[in-house]
Image (tube, grey):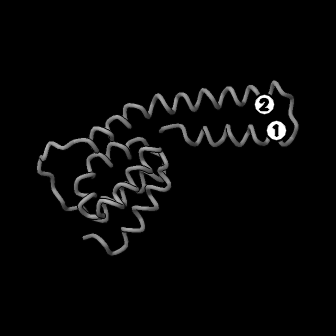
């Protein structure tokens, strides 16, 4: 997991503490925890984002299968929905056939969402394509 749930929880706790006029030291402690969680997220995501960048820049011309089915996309959506870092590897492995199936523009939008760790948006973009569009 990339820690997004923890980050959301800490951000919410900080906001609540501020709204409730909690002591400054309490708010600062929550914000410090949030900063650590964000740094951890950045560190954990960096190698995966590099892998995605290499995939995007890969111009080796290696022939890849171009077929993809709705079960593959549904599995990727499930990984994205649960904020599972395995979604990054799965997306990498599915990229060539996914690009062929959804088209370059939609693929780039999905890729950009995943690069920004906006897994919810990536899943939504995939689901727009999913119904009846694949074997």
Q: Quadrant of residue 14?
A: top right
Say which quarter of the image contains residue 73: bottom left
Question: In the rendering, which numbered label is found on residue 18?
Answer: 1
For marks 2 and 1, the one nearer the N-term is: 1
Looking at the image, is 74 positioned above or below residue 11?
below
The secondary structure type at the circle numbered 1 is helix
**Residue 98 falls left or right of residue 83:** left
For the C terminus, give its image quadrant.
Answer: bottom left
- Kindly identify the residue that appears in the image at 44 percent across and 51 percent down: 113
Q: Is residue 88 left or right of residue 28?
A: left
How busy is the neighbourhood of tag 1: few (under 14 within 10 Å), some, or many (20 plus)? Answer: some
Q: At which x and y percent is residue 91? A: 33, 49
Q: Residues within 10 Å of mark 2 (few under 14, many from 20)?
A: some
Q: Are marks 2 and 1 in contact (CB under 8 Å)?
A: yes
Outermost residue, bottom direction?
Answer: 132
In this orientation, which residue lies closer to the viewer: 93 or 106? 106
Q: Horizontally, is 11 left or right of 53 in the view?
A: right
Q: Residue at x 43, y 62 (%)?
A: 125
Image x and y of residue 46, in percent: 41, 32
Above or below, 126 against 57 in this view is: below
Q: CA distance from mark 2 to mark 1?
A: 7 Å
Q: Is residue 123 left or right of residue 37?
A: left
Q: Which residue position holds label 2?
A: 27
Query: Residue 116: x percent and y percent?
Result: 47, 44
């Amino acid at each position: 997991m990339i820690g997004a749930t923890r980050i959301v929880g800490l951000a919410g706790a900080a906001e609540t503490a501020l709204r409730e006029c909690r002591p400054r030291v309490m708010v600062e402690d929550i914000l410090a925890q949030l900063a650590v969680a964000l740094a951890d997220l950045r560190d954990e995501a960096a190698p995966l984002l590099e892998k995605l960048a290499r995939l995007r820049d890969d111009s080796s011309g290696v022939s890849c299968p171009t077929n993809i089915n709705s079960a593959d996309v549904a599995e990727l959506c499930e990984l994205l929905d649960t904020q599972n870092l395995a979604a990054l590897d799965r997306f990498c492995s599915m990229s060539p056939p996914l690009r062929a199936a959804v088209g370059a523009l939609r693929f780039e939008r999905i890729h950009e969402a995943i690069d920004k760790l906006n897994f919810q948006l990536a899943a939504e973009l995939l689901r727009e394509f999913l119904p009846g569009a694949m074997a």
